[in-house]
Amino acid sequence: MDRDRWPALLGECGFTGTVQTGTDDRSVLLAAADRLPAGEPAPPAPAPPAPAPPTRAPGAAWVVVTETPGEVPTAQALSGLLGGTGTVIVTATCEPSACAAALPADTAGVVLLLGGGEHRPPDSPAGTADDVVSLTTRRAAVLKSLAAACADRPENTRPALWLVTRPSGLFPAPERPAHPADAAVWGAARTLANERPDLPVRRISLDPSGDPAADALRLAHELLAPTDEDEIVLTRGGRFVPRETQRPADQPATDPTRSSFALDVRSPGLSRQLVWRETEPLRPGPGEVLVEMRAVALNYRDPMRANGLLPPEAVEGTPLSRGLGTDGAGVIAAVGPGVTGFTVGDRVCGLMAGALASHALMPAFTVCPILDGMTFAEAATFPVVFFTVHHTLVDEARPLPGETVLVHGGAGAVGLAVIQCARALGLRVIATAGTETKRDLLRTLGVAHVLDSRTLDFAPRILELTQGEGVDIVVNSLSGEAIARSLDLLRPNGRFIELGKRDIFFNNPLLLRPFHRSITFLGFNLDSIVYDPVRGPRLLHDTTARVASGQYRPLPHAVHPAARVDEAFRLLQHSRHTGKVVVSFDPLDEPVPVEPLPAALSPDPEGTYLVTGGLGGFGAATAEWLADRGARHLALVSRRGSEAPEAAAVLERLAGRGVRATPYAADVTDEAAMREVIAAVDATAHPLRGVVHCAMHLDDAPLADLTDERFAAVLAPKAAGADVLDRLTAGHDLDLFLLYSSVTAATGNLAQAPYVAGNAYLEALVRARRHAGRTATAIAWGPIAATGYVARNNLTATMTGIGFEPLAPTEAFTAAEPLIAADTAVAGIGRYRWGRARRLLPLLAGPRYAGLVPKDAGGLDDTREELLRSLTAMTPEDAVRAITDILARHLATVLHTEPSELDPDRHLEEFGLDSLMGAEFILHAREYFDIHIPPSELMGSGRTLTHFARLIHDRLGIHPDHRPQPPNASPAP
């Protein structure tokens, strides 16, 4: 979190007197809170005080519109809180003139309170087929009239329009799906907000508490102190605001309830993503124990492996090569045959393959008990680091008291462990570190001489400190020229401990002249030692004995919950930490998002699947998709049945797949007709097993221009049709109840208020069904190419131009199948350019879409074509400078500094850019310029931002006649 946000957060948590100090990359905060010491009984907590009434708006009137007498008590309580020059309570009307007359001249806001407009059984989410259509049509007419009355006011005096519904299920929990019909008018209000951007239209979902005064107080806080939020959900448990999120279609939705999972890397390399994936449960074999993980300490090998920076030989064929994570601590969950000395429930730590998981296996002879009083996170900081240091420094280097050891990266985990070990052995320590903050830490820990590891100046400085004699031991993690400089610092009989792997894996040469001084070079592979039948147990015994005696103590560490494992990896690869970075699996942490094992849609070949709108367009494509997935009996419904224009071709294609498809002529909103269709299906030997509702109708016009009849005609196929299917299938054992919604339900498309309303209702109905224990899924489709409405009307180019690129049906169904198989409630599928769509739909500028719409969406669309046009218009020299500036911004993001601090002609390695940070920088450049840049282009010596900019300029090909010659090239004859 940004350093500037911490004081405010501490204040919200009850801390006072916060003092903050530190540097740009480290902060120290001191704060106090009134709380009892741990272990003392707390006095009974007083009842929380009632929230203070909000400040009334001076000199302004409010109009509260009630739908039924049931909302009047809340309206009356609200009127006393809103104040101003007076609050008017009126009954909802569809007459524009009556609405206009009800608004005083100084109206600050209009509140439409919706209530008991439905007449349906209390145990059913829907009543008759006409209920939701007539109710929503009437509500939309009221909304339209109120909007017109507000819009008639002068521009700077137009009152805000607030729609207050009951909890509908349009949003997931914690909103309750109690009144799905309210979602429909919410959808219409979204369209209204886009059609009238000059008129503030806000929406509140209020879950009534039964106390009108309390409900009014909650509403008044929102009305009198509005924020940027235009959609607010007030539940019985608190206030929530919605946020739209998206993910690539090939990434399944996560499920925090999975009990067995492991960390995996999607697309290892520069664009890698860390994901928790469900796994089959592990079982211990002979001589093994199964550990339920509680904490795992990361090592540099983990992010390097995830980023594809380790060669195969670094991880293949070793005992620890399986999965990510090596340092683990947890509780024994099971023991294998032949294991003695350990039982289920023991707290243990040690080296284990694939430790970044819910469970991990380890050989019993490598298990270390955790000392009483030591936390799991503390225990996880020991295994790799202290096994490494003890073996290399104690067993191999065999130092004598009084010798001098140089440790590079002294503030890292290995460096801090070396300092502990060196003190126990009576050695003098000289350390290097990469930042002033880390160097200050080492001085605080008592290291007398601390130098900078990011330059080679440490070498002459060490000679000064040792009167030209150098050091006895070097513990190295640096690469390149720093190795040679460090070797030169060794005295005769010195020992060089190489813990860095980069030069080893790249098989870089090493100059041999320094070895004339009888120098020993020690390479190290932890696997080879720990799993050695003789050396391993001895190392384990010696190290744990020093832990028990207190000579080796837990390292400083930063803990990240497993749900935020990517933050932990980034912290490590940017070297912004001290000591170890630990991933926690504490049961009290936030749930871990786990991708479930892949599931496939498997229709029952003996059942029948009913598809409304299934004899043409996308509905027909849906029928063929079901056939491809295994359905063998289909009931296809449309108004014209077998006489529909595409019916004959559809039936012929299905017959060719071996599918028995029966056409039915019926209006899905006609309950009697649909009852006959379902009865006919049930009369066969293949009972109804699933429903897909694809029927739709469009009649585009602004809400202000739509008559009630036109509005209802568009709404009915979606909403009334879904109601009919919901009721008529109540007694059926369905494995599929799929409703086709649209992205418009979320975006509020212009001129499609009833269509948006219908789709919003479908999504709420799905959540209501699922709340009642019935199967249901809604897919909110983006535009579909090749078939259906967009294809028939040649709208593909138009939709793409406004940011909604149509999908081919095969793409769409490929993305939908895992969602349906995983029993997803509501999900959207599409390909969008939200920046472009934002220009057409003002609603997308709101906080709900903040995570999707680029912050600069109001400016130029940052497509590659426009970038190229901009650069092409410049001279080659100016284009290179522009690219250099862009690269500087990206590099500054990686290094957490300011672009102005980066000299474009300075070598990149001088900025402290290691291989992990370099990989991230290349990824930024690749994504921004949309070109392939191999890591070798950056990792070579002598590279600068200007050099890199010229390389990119050349690859873009925008000035083909401009090819700058190398600096030493001779002029052409």
Image (cartoon, rainbow, N blue to C red):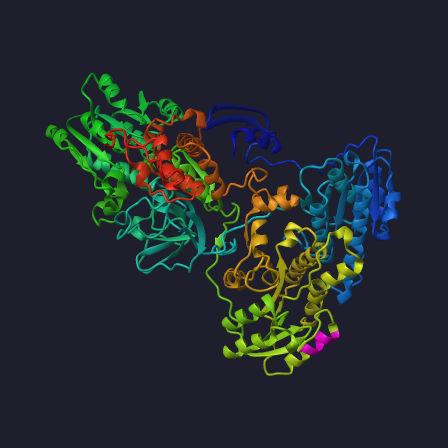
* Quadrant housing residue 769: bottom right
Task: Point out the residue furthest to the left here.
Answer: 516
Judge by depth and name the residue closer to the eye, 416 or 616. Answer: 616
* Quadrant housing residue 421: top left
Examine the rendered structure and indicate whether residue 267 appears above or below residue 730: above
- Which residue is depicted at the point 19% across and 18% down? 468
Q: Position of residue 740 (x, y in %)?
A: 62, 62
Q: Position of residue 664 (x, y in %)?
A: 66, 77
Q: Position of residue 884 (x, y in %)?
A: 41, 31
Judge by depth and name the residue closer to the eye, 741 or 304. Answer: 741
- Which residue is depicted at the point 26% across and 37% down? 499
Q: Is residue 55 left or right of residue 568?
A: right
Dominant SS in magenta: helix
Judge by depth and name the residue closer to the eye, 669 or 414. Answer: 669
Q: Is residue 752 visible?
A: yes
Q: Quadrant of the C terminus?
A: top left
* Quadrant housing residue 137: bottom right
How many marks the image carries: the answer is 0
Is residue 724 found inside the magenta-colored segment of the image?
no
Examine the rendered structure and indicate whether residue 64 appears above or below residue 711: above
Q: Is residue 374 visible?
A: no
Judge by depth and name the residue closer to the eye, 585 or 156. Answer: 156
Is residue 677 found inside the magenta-colored segment of the image?
yes
**Magenta residues (range):** 672-678
- Which residue is depicted at the point 46% across and 26% down? 24
Q: Position of residue 395 (x, y in %)?
A: 21, 37
